[in-house]
Amino acid sequence: MTTLIINIKELLQIREASIKKVSGVEMAILPSLKNAYLLIENDLISDFGLMENCPKIIPNKSIDATGKMVLPSWCDSHTHIVYAGNREQEFVDRINGLSYEEIANRGGGILNSAKKLNETSEEEIYNQSKQRLEEIMRLGTGAVEIKSGYGLTVEGELKMLRVIKKLSENYPIKVKATFLGAHAFPSEYKENHSGYLDLITNEMLPKIAAENLAEYIDVFCEKGYFSVEETERILVAGKQFGLIPKIHVNQFNTIGGIAVGVKHHALTVDHLEVLTDEDIAILKGSDTMPVALPSCSYFLSIPYTPARKIINAGLPLAIATDFNPGSTPSGNMNFVVATACIKMKMTPEEAINAATINGAFAMGISHSHGSISVGKKANLIITKPITSYYQLPYAFGSNLIDMVILEGKEI
């Protein structure tokens, strides 16, 4: 099956396949070709170039992209889209003055979602979650990381991870699974942290490894959740079962979580709304990818990750949605890109790089996703006719996507 896209106004994010991420000043560069073509063979990009060099072939399908831009699909490296029900009431509670922490202390937040999930069948969780997955695919996401963490019991966590695996098997979108049993302490372990850590390390992890249900392990390292010492214990245990570390860190406080993440070669450190010069210095000596979640800051009205500070220090940065029922009930990467520009003062080039090639790195898939490169997956966004790619973040409330192609096929 061959598909030829012709007359592309501008083909964005063209790279050598060997480039895995961009950092610092390189993030301001978005390589492109104007008046271009792109050839897809089956599910891979096989060729691209200027229209004057377009091959004289008769493809199975031809798409005329006159006036339109083509770019790689979004890579969303941080989501929690497998959950049951919603937390609409907490949204209203925050409007009425309660903080995220106050809601959590009243049994809301993550524990609220855990209660609903454990009361809901695996089939119903799958049916709810697949609707969210289908939505983000239509919005241009072609690769997504999904975390557990709303079970907080052995069966609840396994149930979530099995749903994630089923979604991966049933949809043409790259899905990466992360075990986040250390998302919060269940009520029954509130005064027995060591007991819950034993449950994670002695019961959850062996069963997850036996069923090959996750590639990454994550911890919410934050005051009131998991301490640096507890985080380290969980990461060490996860690594013994072959899981690669990631961390939720520095959302509300800086307590030393970045240092422990870098120590254990975490692929990513995510949130980073609060960031010190010491944190920056630690990241500069590592291969760990900082990940910002701008729509979480938007929804909770908390500070935004200091993108300029990170990029100006020569570091890379990825952006993701944090799609979850409590703090970010949206998986719209287009809004994330726009918010990164509007609120975090990232340039459109930096934001697109953060949402594509660096997002792919943050999922361990930059060899196959995140750029227009020969041999990579044909996961593409074709825009509506637009004046320039600056319009993508500028017209933040408009849907400027005309077509999404995932694994070589229009969805």
Image (tube, helix red, strand yellow):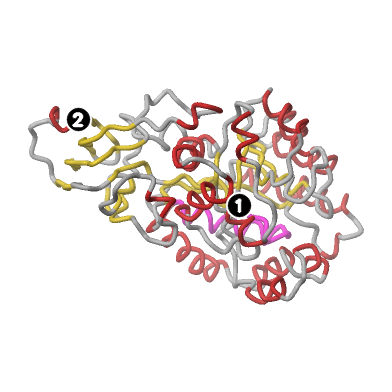
Please tell me in which quadrant of the rendered image residue 282 appears. Answer: top right
Comes first in the chain, label 2 or label 1: 2
Residue type (three-letter) at the residue carrying disc 2: Leu
Q: Secondary structure at mark 1?
A: strand
Relative placement, left or right, of 273 versus 81 is: right
Question: Splitting the image into 4 quarters, where does residue 305 fall?
Answer: top right
Quarter placement of the N terminus: top left
- Mark seen at residue 226: none
Marks 2 & 1, CB-CB < 8 Å contact: no
Which quadrant would residue 362 be assigned to in this image?
A: top right
Q: Secondary structure at mark 2?
A: strand
Q: CA distance from mark 2 to mark 1?
A: 41 Å
Report the quarter where the C terminus lies: bottom left
Q: Amino acid at mark 1?
A: Lys
- Going by the image, does 84 lie left or right of 186? left
Confirm whether the magenta stretch covers residue 57: no
Residue located at (34% from left, 30% from top) = 373
Q: Which residue is disc 1 drawn over? A: 147
Q: Position of residue 116 (x, y in %)?
A: 66, 72
Comparing 13 with 77, the one in front is 13
Q: Which residues are magenta?
A: 147-168
Residue at 71% across / 71% down in the picture?
94
Q: Position of residue 391 (x, y in %)?
A: 37, 50
Q: Position of residue 207 (x, y in %)?
A: 67, 49
**Chief secondary structure of the magenta portion:** helix
Q: Position of residue 95 (x, y in %)?
A: 69, 73
Residue that badge 2 annotates: 50
For image coordinates 43% across by 62% down, the residue present is 397
Magenta-drawn stretch contains 166: yes
Mark 1: few, some, or many residues within 10 Å (few <14, many ≥20)? many
Is 98 left or right of 69, judged from the image as shown? Answer: right
Against 252, residue 81 (above or below) is below
